[in-house]
Image (cartoon, coloured by chain):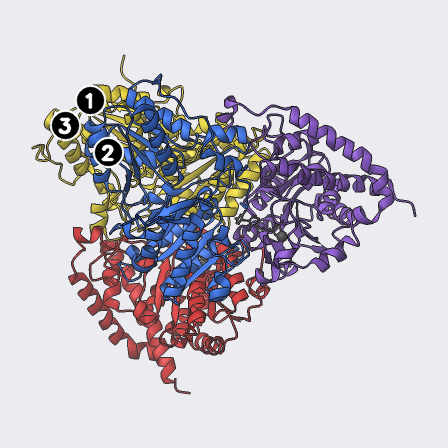
Chain colours: A purple, B red, C yellow, D blue
Amino acid sequence: MPHTAAYREMFRTSLLIRRVEEKIIDLYPSDKIQSPVHLSIGQEAVSVGLCRALAPGDLVFGTYRSHALYVACGGDLTQMFAELMGRIGGISKGKAGSMHLAYPAGGLMGSSAVVASHIPHAVGSALAAKLHRSGQVVACVFGDGSLEEGVAHESFNYAALKQLPVLFVCENNALAVHSRIDSRQAFSIEAMARMYGFPYQRIDAGYDFEEVHRTSAATIDAIRTGVGPQFLEVATVRAKEHVGTGDDFGVGYRDRASYDAWCAKDPLLQDRATYDALIADIDAEITAAVAAAEASPAPGLEELLTDVL
Amino acid sequence: MPHTAAYREMFRTSLLIRRVEEKIIDLYPSDKIQSPVHLSIGQEAVSVGLCRALAPGDLVFGTYRSHALYVACGGDLTQMFAELMGRIGGISKGKAGSMHLAYPAGGLMGSSAVVASHIPHAVGSALAAKLHRSGQVVACVFGDGSLEEGVAHESFNYAALKQLPVLFVCENNALAVHSRIDSRQAFSIEAMARMYGFPYQRIDAGYDFEEVHRTSAATIDAIRTGVGPQFLEVATVRAKEHVGTGDDFGVGYRDRASYDAWCAKDPLLQDRATYDALIADIDAEITAAVAAAEASPAPGLEELLTDVL
Amino acid sequence: MTQPRPEIVSYANALLEAMDGALSQSPNTVILGQGADDHKGIFGSTTGLATKYGADRVSDMPLMEDGMTGIAVGLALNGVYPILTHIRSDFVLLSANQIINLIAKYKYMFGGLFEVPMLIRTVVGRSWGQGAQHSQSLQSLFAHIPGLTVVAPSSAETILDTYPYLIAKHRAPVISFEHRMLYNLDFEVDRSAAPANPLTPRVVRQGRDLTIVATSIMVLEARRAARWLADNADIQAEVIDLHCLSAIDPAVLMTSLGKTGRLLVCDTSWPGFGTAAEVCRLVVEQDPGVLKQPVRSLGMAPAPCPTAKALEDLYYPNLATVVDAAAALVRGRVDHGVPLPAEKTMSDIYKKFRGPF
Amino acid sequence: MTQPRPEIVSYANALLEAMDGALSQSPNTVILGQGADDHKGIFGSTTGLATKYGADRVSDMPLMEDGMTGIAVGLALNGVYPILTHIRSDFVLLSANQIINLIAKYKYMFGGLFEVPMLIRTVVGRSWGQGAQHSQSLQSLFAHIPGLTVVAPSSAETILDTYPYLIAKHRAPVISFEHRMLYNLDFEVDRSAAPANPLTPRVVRQGRDLTIVATSIMVLEARRAARWLADNADIQAEVIDLHCLSAIDPAVLMTSLGKTGRLLVCDTSWPGFGTAAEVCRLVVEQDPGVLKQPVRSLGMAPAPCPTAKALEDLYYPNLATVVDAAAALVRGRVDHGVPLPAEKTMSDIYKKFRGPF
Ligand SMILES: Cc1ncc(C[n+]2csc(CCOP(=O)(O)OP(=O)(O)O)c2C)c(N)n1
Ligand SMILES: Cc1ncc(C[n+]2csc(CCOP(=O)(O)OP(=O)(O)O)c2C)c(N)n1
Ligand SMILES: [Mg+2]
Ligand SMILES: [Mg+2]
């Protein structure tokens, strides 16, 4: 069966994300990017499937690990690389760096490097949507570790109490830095979601952007009809070390075999035909973006105290 | 059937608490007690049943509404009244007041006026008990409102992860100040407790100190054998306004009828025989304590900067 | 022509007026806080507004200070102006992460892509055994953090000239420290006297002998002390109400000190790393030569707040301690000979305060 | 007799030694923190200790800063000495309620019935785009609060003379601000030089022309600047390492200023309501007359921390800005004529730092 246009588009976005991050890995030793980077390689499909299901005007909030979300929201690549390189042409003039990507034009309303601190932001924006009857849906993407923070509980309770139009998306890579989920959580994510009465769905094939998209789209449609918050858990894998561009299978806290098994199913690795058809164009786009970003100057003294208040 | 000795003792402690608080109501207009008071009238049985089930060396933590807990832990009445009156003879030299009663000799390790902030304290003491293999059980008494605070989630998760010897006791009066529980919580308390895998029990007859004691004792025995944390919810009613000594059935946020129904079952009101047998002795004890407390001087300047570090 | 009788407004009513005005002027303004909709209405400052504007716009909250503050960020990002209430400033510590790590930084960190204007109202407790956890006045913690506007209104008038401005025009997050002991006091209000920039310090009394820089309720104590000193010792104190802690114009301080040469700072919190410290820094970075005498600062004693009334009375500065410190400064010796007021004055409102808390 | 070669210890190794010592000296000491047991071991300061002392005593934590800090209270109340770790000081804001409302008050509020001795270790981030949320140095927030002991060790030596004392003898809660940029630096350590009271400020260099009061890594910048000034302009700076922020002995400041008459404060945080402010207060409450010149303070620019390296370089004071400020103070004019160092010195460690973060 030939692939649908949607498949190709999502494949392209996913591959774009991965190649952007691989470009970051390439560039990193040059010190052109002086910012901690939390790579999404392995997790691209979550953002891609989700963002495609959002309508214009919908909002989304993410974490420090949001390269994928930025690109999936349609974020400009030159502005992204310029941001990572600390240039004035960055989406946030170089003040944000990798950990705080935002792209309001595409609905990405910020990303925080304090774990879970953005969850109430999504709830608040959903409350505003409800007050204004704007029809917006707000999505919130967070890692499994977020669920341990108290603010997750507070935010979920409030979203449920007020039946707000918010979709919680847990990107479960079963790791927080070097700690495995079973050493951190005495609860199941499903039980937590259901405690607030959230309809809960889980996607095991977190590499499958089509499934993520199908599920997200149906869920977002439902939210838009006013059914209240929903919870989606997506199993995924983080390919690289927690922060930085290296591999760290050797240091003992995670196993290589399950990663390899995951790769065996990853469309970006397995569907060579689509890959080959897109790669040149994607790489050219990235090369151009990097060049344009490098052409942007560093912010000067006049920026130091701008936008404080 | 004649009452058991245990019944009489718990009746006595409950009545002692109630009369202590009624004495506080009496004294309040005199301004001898210059401290906000959060009365436990209606809720005495929870502390009485629970504390009787604790063994020497066990610890307990409470809230600003802890007159009952203090007395149930065997706290000295003179030191309590002196504390409320801000006298040097107070259990905490007058620095604590009504909101921060403690009685380490009886296991009461403090009470906090920041809602839920003592829950992790209990978990931490239980962790110490486990590290030391001390055989201690730690009890934590909190209101229904506590469960909304993020720290409750964090603390419960940790207690469950480490299977600590802690008994969580939720005194559910269905109110937080003037807000009813259904306007604050989108979850059931049972669902929350079970999410962490806590064995959960609920006592509807929160006026029944014998039932509270039976359940607490069995639960504490189990905890002492190493089964991990347990959760006990006790339905109860707060007779008085949230803070202060008045009644506030008239202001519209709560109904009188269910309070009256509760009173119809309250042994302190219904068992006149036991009441009559004990009241004179109790009141004499309280009168003596108040007199002794009043004889204690106010703390002087030398106390102002003592015990800061 | 007869002088019109001055308008009298209580602090609580000024707050209520400001809240009502904000809700009526923009449908995008909401108030969120525990008990904001109940019969006590945050000590009278929100009473009746839930009925008037609906439960959606004046809304009770569960116990979730951290989450609630994060919700305010999300509201602000999606076009709603949130006003949060906390019945004690101590409780905002539960939302320190949101206020300091997120709210203070949201505009700058994203290079100006976003703004999160909001007003966080907190009430500073005092008296009747509030104790260690219900008595803190945490303005300096937040004033240390760039990105936050921190105010501590000392009167109904400053509320009325500042809150509407902050809510309607100041596109930045604000945290306000309102003093519980001020709520029930009545103030003269001159609505025509609003300064062009309501965030500058205000010289509320002219004087030549010393400068008392004060915040919140200490402005009242300072003014009463100034009156006493004038009446009893011909000492003329200039009194400056700092009002906004996050943007203190040193010129106002230097102009005054240029006249008086003597500085007494009276704040509602601890002096160390507090308002007193910051005022000293601003002065000596300009010119330490203006100071003819060692500076004095008065604030809470360096301890948690005790509940016993006897200790609380020693813990806080009062009319007598302000007079004493001022007189010692001006006379240049501790045995200054200026009679001290008997404790029959404003401290009474602390002594008499019996709730609601 | 030959001078013994000085012992060289890195900051990270001093921390590891102090942690190891604490665990070995008392079975009741535990370390709790996210990643405390992993292969990175809090940047080398806990590496191997989980294996050596067991997972019960050196324990990873879920993401629960607030709860974890409350757990430390419960541990302390039941006979265990907890050491908490936070890989960034910014994250302690999530536990501000426990630290300020509970821990700082537990002893006093209960009239001395309880003590909650503990050590909260936090790491201040800098460089390589840490940005607004991973770069704060929040010592002054906590130093404002009575009941807390706040330290900011500037060297391996100060760690080795202070941490064992705090853990074994100081029966009060401590919060420490360790600087990430110091971890990988090597220091000379003289184990015989430990002061009797390790919490007093330390005069780390004698001088006659100005006093530089510094904290944490700014002590190193100040010492380097002092060397430069001596070598290039015959300016002799006295350098004081404040070390403990919560108990600054003003006598140490006054003795130095009595000689130099000029004050420059260099802190790792914002000057406003910060260390610079407090130092100014302490001085002018003693005697403003010692100050021959306006005070200068250097710290982070009054903004959240930007990630772009170009802006970060402007955001923090460095060797050149310290030299410049000091020279201007001593010469009494901004065109002081003292040559400024080219940026080829310690700032390199910031420039070169590339993680682990
Ligand atoms: C409040 C807070 N605590 C600790 C950290 C340090 N930290 C950064 S990422 C992280 C792990 C988060 O794990 P998870 O939420 O599962 O996200 P993932 O990194 O797996 O995408 C931790 C502990 C932080 N940034 N914020
Ligand atoms: C963190 C915090 N937020 C708000 C308050 C104000 N407050 C005091 S008691 C209370 C209600 C608590 O309700 P619950 O836990 O059910 O206990 P109850 O008073 O019913 O015993 C509130 C909101 C507080 N003390 N602490
Ligand atoms: Mg994860
Ligand atoms: Mg309740």
Q: Are marks 1 and 2 in contact (CB under 8 Å)?
A: no
State the residue lying farthest toward the right: A1
Residue B171, quarter of picture: bottom left
Label drawn at residue D283: 2
Placement of D50 over or under B281, stated as above or below? above
Mark 1 and mark 2: span between their CA atoms?
A: 19 Å
The first of marks 1 and 3 along the sequence is 1
Q: Position of residue D308 (x, y in %)?
A: 55, 31
- Any atom of ligand 2 within 8 Å of the CB at mark 1? no
Q: Are marks 1 and 3 in contact (CB under 8 Å)?
A: no
Label drawn at residue C260: 1
Q: Quadrant of the N terminus of chain B?
A: bottom left
Chain to which mark 1 belongs = C
The residue to which callout 3 is attached is C330
Placement of C33 over or under C264, stated as above or below? below
Indicate which quadrant contains ligand 2.
bottom left
